[in-house]
Image (tube, helix red, strand yellow):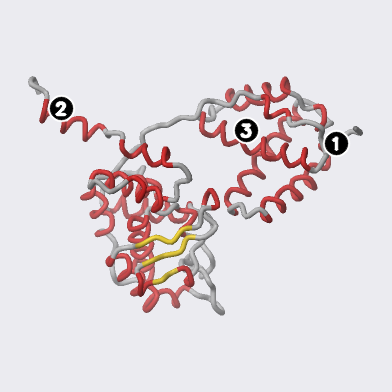
Amino acid sequence: MASLSIKNYEDLREQYSRRLEVRGYAPGTIRLYRIYVNQFMGFLKRERMKNLRKVDIKVLDGYQDYLFGRERKLKRASQRNNLHGLNSFFKWMRREKLIKDNPVQEMEFPKKPNPLPRGILTEKEVFRILGSVGHETKFDIRNKALLELLYATGMRSGEIVNLRISDLKLDYSMVHITNAKNRRDRVIPMGKTAVRALRKYLKTARAQFLDKGKLPWLFTNNKGRKMWGGRVATMIVKKYAKQARIGPNVTAYTLRHSMGTHLVRREAPLRYIQELLGHKYIVSTQIYTRLVPEDLRRFHRKYHPRA
């Protein structure tokens, strides 16, 4: 085979990205995979490699060492995600007959971590956050609806900013989540409190955000445009967590993990929680069954003879 120069890798990246779109990958996943390709190409340039067909297991082991040894060492989960993205790119090149073999398949990936979710909030703490939101301004009304929906459904921050008005079925207290992680669209219920907050937002506040014309998105930013990325949702969560004096490290994912934990504590079936959270495998849901330190302390005091 002739040389496959990395000079024109942007063209390859764009072709690869289009293929991911056709296959129905979520926009956030495509964006991450593009970043992983860019990072790997930057590494090859630093190593003065010019031909993608020369990439072998030795080069890839060097890249893995590079990921591990960066100034701010990448966590194992981030390393795994990076290498999985790279594997997807090389698999695509092999299918397109741009390369003969996929050397990434020979790699030993870092073991998948299975940590206990951090910073799980108590139900009272979540209620304090939700109760700290005002009722007067359009910002408070929008943010109240967003926070109530996050906790009611446990959806991911990237999912909530991509919701369209047409995804809501308020008369049935249901919401349709599309373009989800793992390409697992789902229809899930929400409680009366979230429905009330959403009705108020749609009736009194949403139109005030729109600059010109109509937008399909449920939540818009302060300039009347689509919220860009899940970070915006996390910024809103952080604002009211600080207001409620809960702490600085509360994120949209904290609400998601807390909701999953609260359901387990109330003895909800794992299969139900799996569907709500959109987990592909139930093993991802089982993490919520692991006792957090607060639970261990309570059981220790109750059952240990010397507690």
Residue occupying image coordinates x 47% and y 68%: 167
Query: What residue type is disc 2 on?
Result: His
Q: What element carries label 3?
A: helix
User: Would you name the residue on which mark 1 appears?
Assistant: 5
Q: Does 1 sit above or below residue 265?
A: above
Query: What residue type is disc 1 on?
Result: Ser
275 sits to left or right of 61: left
Q: Where is residue 140 in the image (x, y as percent from the top left)?
A: 34, 66
User: Would you name the residue on which mark 2 appears?
Assistant: 300
Residue occupying image coordinates x 43% and y 61%: 187
Q: Which residue lies furthest to the left in this view?
A: 305
Q: Does 47 sit above or below residue 199?
A: above
Q: Residue 83 carries which label?
A: 3
Q: Report the mark closest to the observer, 1 or 2.
A: 2
How far apart in space, not on screen, are marks 3 and 2 (Cα)?
42 Å
How far apart in space, not on screen, are marks 1 and 2 (Cα)?
62 Å
Structural crowding at the residue carrying mark 2, measured as other residues with C-alpha within 10 Å and reported as few (<14), some (14–19) or many (≥20): few
Q: Where is residue 141 in the image (x, y as percent from the top left)?
A: 34, 69
Q: Is mark 1 on a helix, strand or loop?
A: loop
Figure quadrant of the C terminus: top left
Task: Tell me if label 3 and label 2 are in contact, CB under 8 Å.
Answer: no
Structural crowding at the residue carrying mark 3, measured as other residues with C-alpha within 10 Å and reported as few (<14), some (14–19) or many (≥20): many
